[in-house]
Image: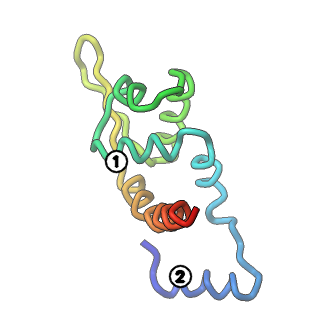
Amino acid sequence: MMKESETNSIKEGLKEGKLCLCPVKGIIDVLSKKWTLLVIVAIGNHKSMRFNKIMEHFEGINPKTLSDRLKELENANLIIREAFPEVPLRVEYSLSKDGEELIEAIIPLMDWATKKDAQK
């Protein structure tokens, strides 16, 4: 989590018109892709999920897209892929510590979106 001094520094930069999004560019590149936030939230809500359960959870996502998103999230250290040495192979996905922190960080955004949606 960010320290209060870091948060204040970011707010001051915004007030002065000098806000730099450089630190978040990489994560925005990952999160801005279709299905990504939904996959993160679904895994977080279920603690761990298998590929087919994630597929069942979303209507309209194709297997290649889901596979790509899971690899990107694993590469970004937001999820953990655990393969079990069984026949057939069993793979489960869960949130990493960074993924859990991301969920906490997007809660204010979800609250804001909910309020905006209620105003319609």
The residue sitting at 51% across, 87% down in the picture is: 5
The amino acid at mark 1 is Gly
Q: Quadrant of residue 10?
A: bottom right
Q: Is residue 79 above or below residue 63?
A: below
The residue sitting at 45% across, 40% down in the picture is: 39
The residue pinned by badge 2 equals 7
Q: Under tag 2, what secondary structure? A: helix
Residue sitting farthest toward the top: 87
Q: Under tag 1, what secondary structure? A: helix
The residue sitting at 55% across, 30% down in the picture is: 68
The amino acid at mark 2 is Thr
- Residue 44 got which mark? 1
Q: In 3D space, how far apart are the residues under numbered discs 2 and 1 (Cα atoms)?
A: 26 Å
Where does the image place residue 96, in percent across and percent down from the top left? 36, 49
Q: Are marks 2 and 1 in contact (CB under 8 Å)?
A: no
Looking at this view, is 49 or 90 the one in front?
Answer: 49
Q: Is residue 66 above or below residue 96?
A: above
Where does the image place residue 81, in percent across and percent down from the top left? 37, 35
Where does the image place residue 78, in percent across and percent down from the top left? 44, 48
Horizontal side, residue 115 vs residue 42: left or right? right
Please report whichever mark, 2 or 1, sits nearer to the chain's N-terminal start. 2
Q: Quadrant of residue 79?
A: top left
Mark 1 neighbour class, 10 Å CA radius: few under 14, some 14 to 19, many 20 or more: some
Horizontal side, residue 29 vs residue 66: left or right? right
